Image: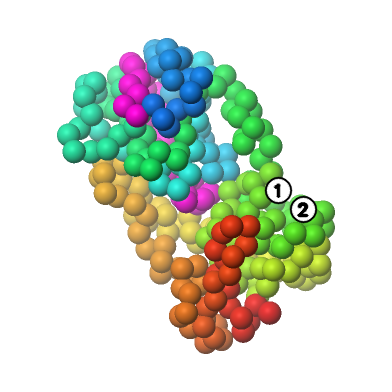
Amino acid sequence: MPEAPEVEALARALRPLIRGRKIRCCRLVHPVVVPAPQRFSLARNVRGARILGVKRRGKYLLLPLSRGGIIFHFRFDGQLLWFDESNNTPPPNIHVDVLFHLDRGTIAFVDPRHLGRVEWHESPEQIPGIRFLGPDALSPRLAVSTLAGILSRSDHPVKVVLLDQTRIAGIGNIYSSESLWRARLDPRRPANSLRAPEIRRLHKAVVSVLRRALECCQNPAPDFRDPSWWFTGLDRILAVYGREGKPCRRCGRKIRRIAQAQRSTFCCPGCQE
């Protein structure tokens, strides 16, 4: 699932490509990715609107328009593609769900599993998932004191708290596991049991992990013209995620996978306990 670094990289790459463009029309190829109440109104609401910019909020990608805005939520497999043509026919042999035909070029939302979402709203806050987001993980607002306050208010496992988008926006399963490994913290520890030095260590780890991931996600930059494109090189910077049974890069013990909140957590039983 794209987390804050991946979505931020998408926003930075997409911005110069579509900012200032006018939406000629919108075509729903697979309407299932659009909420049912909007399946007849999305095209009408965006037709003729100008794209004012590209922003990110947590794991959401926002396109502010001259009226309202488009919100993309990629979930697990959603992605964006760009076609230089502006005709109404999707390219052959390429799965697309929603096409936005601009005055020059076409942007497409693609999700073969149809778990992602495309919506139009007058304001992003009309989506509960955005309205109740916590401070952004890539923002200076997430200071050590802010993180300390968030952790102190919950006795849930610290990994579960990091995943809660209403507490901290943008961290998912990958970078929460990586941050806890870097901070040498057991993911099962109650969040409110962390002491001040441990919180400072965790904050430093979160910032470092996300910045390194963002750098990796931008090199190479997203290639919206390549249907098979996806972020490369991330596996080289991961210390625990997806490495069950492999030796810890710090102490040599085998990485373990445990279940937390119906998600897989990867950690080292040697240096995280």
Residue 235 located left or right of residue 266: left
* Residue 25 shown in magenta: yes
* Residue 120 shown in magenta: no
Question: In which quarter of the view is residue 179 placed?
Answer: bottom right
119 or 7: nearer the viewer: 119
> Which corner quadrant holds the C terminus?
bottom right
Q: Position of residue 257 (x, y in %)?
A: 54, 71
Q: Which residues are magenta?
A: 1-30
Residue at x 70% of width, y 62% of height: 158
Question: In which quarter of the view is residue 23 placed?
Answer: top left
Secondary structure of the residue carrying tag 1 is loop
**Residue that carries the numbered disc 2 in the rendered image:** 150
| Among numbered discs 1 and 2, the one appearing first in the sequence | 2
Q: Position of residue 79 (x, y in %)?
A: 38, 42
149 or 261: nearer the viewer: 261
273 or 209: nearer the viewer: 273
**Proximity of marks 1 and 2: CB atoms separated by less than 8 Å:** yes
Residue 53 located left or right of residue 259: left
Residue at x 57% of width, y 19% of height: 122
Residue at x 31% of width, y 38% of height: 81
Q: Position of residue 11 (x, y in %)?
A: 45, 40
Give the residue type that dot 1 points to.
Arg
Q: Position of residue 230 (x, y in %)?
A: 34, 52
Is residue 242 visible from the viewing direction of this image? Answer: yes
Residue 261 located left or right of residue 233: right
Above-or-below relation of 142 to 35: below
Give the residue type that dot 2 points to.
Ile
Circle count: 2
**Residue that carries the numbered disc 1 in the rendered image:** 167
Secondary structure of the residue carrying tag 2 is helix
